Image (cartoon, rainbow, N blue to C red):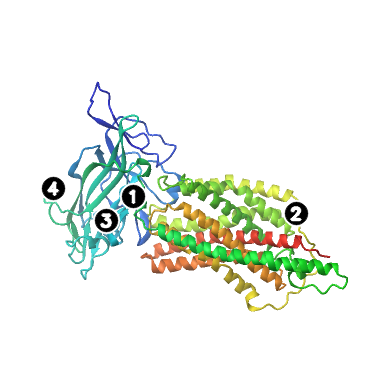
């Protein structure tokens, strides 16, 4: 929050001064900026990114106007992981003091010098790939609002460096907004910004004012005199094949507008409301609810009618002296709790999946309460990482408990795999992606100190907590099953096509994916197209629907397989729900090919590298839901039927 407060009557009674008590709270909640009586509004700059490249870059990488010897604001863990790099800028304004065409700096290049040629080539590459500035004033993104189809206005929390007109005269990206951008094989640079800051006066309590919006218009001016700019003349352009001396002046204009309609608490709304997603979200929810109701009806029919009749018939047969031969799912009661093959690996997956499930649930719950809104930069990722580290205990407990119930005795191997297998795969993938980012000089590359901190959290907190959970899991007695397991396994009869393992697993992931694929579009847009994600209420509701759908679909298929006398349900239940992750991977490939404009080998490798991490996490998450649902179902039905 930025407050404008007057000085005492004994000094300058008419002058309004700025009190930035909380201006850096978005950088680090623990940092409290001293309340200095000043009238300066400071603009911060963030990394630059592009929808055509996965590689973000720091502001200084493009040789824009920068300030020297100013301390860089500290960043939280989530900001570092997302590659945000917030820095001070030379754009500083005085409250309510409008200015026209103020010079920030002149950048001079001589393409005959290697250093200058490198900077110029990098700037051209940024314009060719449509890299976007991201500026911040009082924790508000400086937005570029422009008209789109149907008379709507879209507010983009960023604006391009410049644009390019091809050799054939075809304007690319932002060059379409100005008919003057028409020279072939030419780069046009946005070297001027018209900034408008909206504020309202506080009428209650202590007299002051608050900033409620920051908007801008990027422009291109060649200026008749670069040292004394007048914001006149044609657009600033750079011919692709030009060489020699070049000068680029950077300027700005600033205006202040009083706006009594926007409340400070709702100052983000004009950005979020310009994203027409709400109707699509409700359609997604209704689509998911129809699937859930359909599955719930099927499960209810099985549980209340078919299964009830089965249990009554089985129990009646047991009371008759000339009982007929058993059939259906009761026939395999002596094998249904037989330990699965690769029980060690399954128990490790269940432990990691439990850790991810609880982490996701708690993170989304806090996000719904507003603690992890876009205004709290990096808070979402920070919360998720901290929760994952602290949830090592339930992971170790669940893995140890099920491994013991599977008859396993190698408890040391089990706890080590739980602590290191899945996190190790994720970390190895992440480290390889980080090496590529380091090589490319991207701002998303994690600093060495942060990498050490992540390893310290893993080895010094998560691993010990996993050992503690495993200790209590192995100390407990094994899970008691309602029926005894025969010594000799029963032969499984020939299965029909739809009850075979692979077709059942492939079919099982379709309905859960159908509930979430629309939401996935917005999540992927947020990650790769750099759009703001704020609909955590919708996401939490879809999360609950996904849990219900995975559970019901797995229970349905589990019942059909048991009726076909196939008792290998443990791995099948995990893979049935877990196969939703395969559909997620296919959708991510489709999204890459149809929606994104990513070019370059490094960006492509990074996209699929990070996608594989998300696929593994989603596989463990959905597979664990399916296993626990099926485990509850099997335990329940065999506990209410009489067996010899």
The answer for how far apart the CA atoms under marks 1 and 4 are is 32 Å
Q: Quadrant of the N terminus?
A: top left
Who's the residue at 70% across and 62% down the image?
634
Please tell me how crowded label 2 is: few (under 14), some (14-19), or many (20+) other residues with Cα within 10 Å.
some
Q: Residue furthest left?
A: 224
The relative height of residue 227 versus residue 299 in the rendered view (above or below) is above
Q: Seen in the image, is 566 located left or right of residue 453?
A: right
Callout 4 secondary element: loop
Q: Using the image, tell me which numbered label, if any, was put on residue 478.
A: 2
Residue at 59% of width from left, 52% of height from top?
355
- Mark carried by residue 146: 3
Tag nearer the camera, 1 or 3 = 1
Estimate the x, y position of residue 386 in percent, counting from the top left: 53, 46
Between residue 527 and residue 332, name the one nearer to us.
332
Spot the residue most to the right: 321
Q: How many marks?
A: 4
Q: SS for tag 3?
A: strand
Q: Which residue is mark 4?
A: 230
């Amino acid at each position: 929050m930025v407050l404008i407060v007057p000085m005492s009557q004994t000094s300058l009674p008419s002058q309004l001064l700025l009190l930035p008590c909380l201006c850096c709270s978005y950088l680090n909640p623990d940092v409290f900026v001293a309340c200095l009586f000043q009238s300066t509004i400071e603009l911060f700059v963030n990394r630059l990114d592009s929808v055509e490249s996965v590689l973000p870059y720091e502001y200084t990488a493009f040789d824009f106007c920068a300030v020297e010897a100013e301390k860089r604001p500290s960043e939280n863990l989530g900001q570092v992981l997302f590659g945000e790099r917030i820095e001070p800028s030379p754009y500083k304004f005085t409250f309510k003091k409008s200015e026209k065409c103020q010079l920030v700096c002149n950048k001079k290049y001589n393409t005959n010098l290697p250093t200058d040629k490198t900077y110029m080539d990098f700037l051209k590459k940024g314009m060719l790939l449509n890299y976007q500035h991201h500026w911040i004033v009082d924790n508000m993104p400086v937005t570029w609002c422009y008209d789109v189809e149907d008379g709507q206005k879209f507010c983009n929390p960023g604006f391009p460096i410049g644009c390019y007109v091809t050799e054939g005269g075809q304007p690319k990206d932002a060059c379409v907004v100005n008919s003057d951008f028409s020279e072939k094989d030419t780069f046009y640079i946005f070297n001027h910004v018209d900034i408008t800051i909206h504020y309202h006066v506080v009428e209650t309590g202590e007299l002051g004012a608050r900033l409620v919006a920051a908007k801008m218009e990027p422009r291109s001016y060649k200026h008749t005199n670069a040292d004394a700019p007048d914001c006149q003349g044609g657009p600033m352009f750079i011919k692709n094949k030009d060489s020699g001396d070049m000068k680029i002046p950077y300027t700005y204009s600033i205006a202040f507008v009083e706006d009594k309609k926007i409340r400070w608490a709702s100052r983000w709304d004009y950005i979020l409301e310009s994203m027409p997603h709400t109707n699509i979200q409700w359609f997604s929810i209704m689509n998911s609810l129809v699937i859930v109701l359909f599955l719930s009806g099927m499960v209810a029919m099985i549980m209340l009618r078919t299964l009830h009749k089965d249990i009554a018939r089985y129990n009646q047969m047991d009371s008759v002296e000339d009982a007929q031969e058993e059939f259906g799912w009761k026939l395999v009661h002596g094998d249904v709790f037989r330990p699965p093959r690769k029980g060690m690996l399954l128990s490790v997956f269940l432990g990691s999946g439990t850790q991810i499930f609880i982490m996701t649930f708690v993170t989304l719950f806090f996000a719904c309460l507003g603690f992890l809104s876009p205004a709290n930069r990096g808070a979402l990722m920070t919360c998720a990482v901290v929760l994952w580290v602290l949830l090592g205990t339930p992971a170790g407990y669940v893995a140890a408990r099920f491994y013991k119930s599977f008859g396993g005795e190698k408890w040391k191997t089990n706890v080590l795999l739980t602590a290191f297998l899945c996190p190790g795969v994720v970390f190895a993938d992440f480290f390889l992606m980080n090496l590529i980012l380091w090589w490319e000089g991207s701002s998303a590359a994690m600093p060495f100190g942060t990498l050490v901190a992540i390893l310290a959290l893993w080895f010094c907190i998560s691993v010990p907590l996993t050992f503690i959970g495993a200790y209590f899991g192995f100390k407990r007695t094994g899970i008691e099953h309602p029926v005894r397991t025969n010594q000799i396994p029963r032969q499984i009869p020939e299965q029909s096509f739809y009850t075979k393992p692979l077709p059942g697993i492939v079919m099982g992931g379709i309905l859960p994916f159908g509930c979430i694929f629309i939401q996935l579009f917005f999540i992927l847009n947020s990650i790769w197209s750099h759009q703001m994600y704020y609909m955590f209420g919708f996401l939490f509701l879809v999360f609950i629907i996904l849990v219900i759908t995975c559970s019901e679909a797995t229970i349905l298929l589990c019942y059909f397989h048991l009726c076909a006398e196939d008792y290998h349900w443990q791995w099948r239940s995990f893979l049935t729900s877990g196969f939703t992750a395969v559909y997620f991977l296919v959708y991510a490939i489709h999204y890459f090919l149809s929606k994104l404009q990513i070019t370059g080998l490094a960006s492509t490798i990074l996209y699929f590298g990070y996608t594989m991490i998300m696929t593994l996490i989603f596989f463990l998450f959905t597979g664990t839901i399916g296993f626990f649902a099926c485990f509850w179902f099997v335990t329940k039905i065999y506990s209410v039927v009489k067996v010899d």
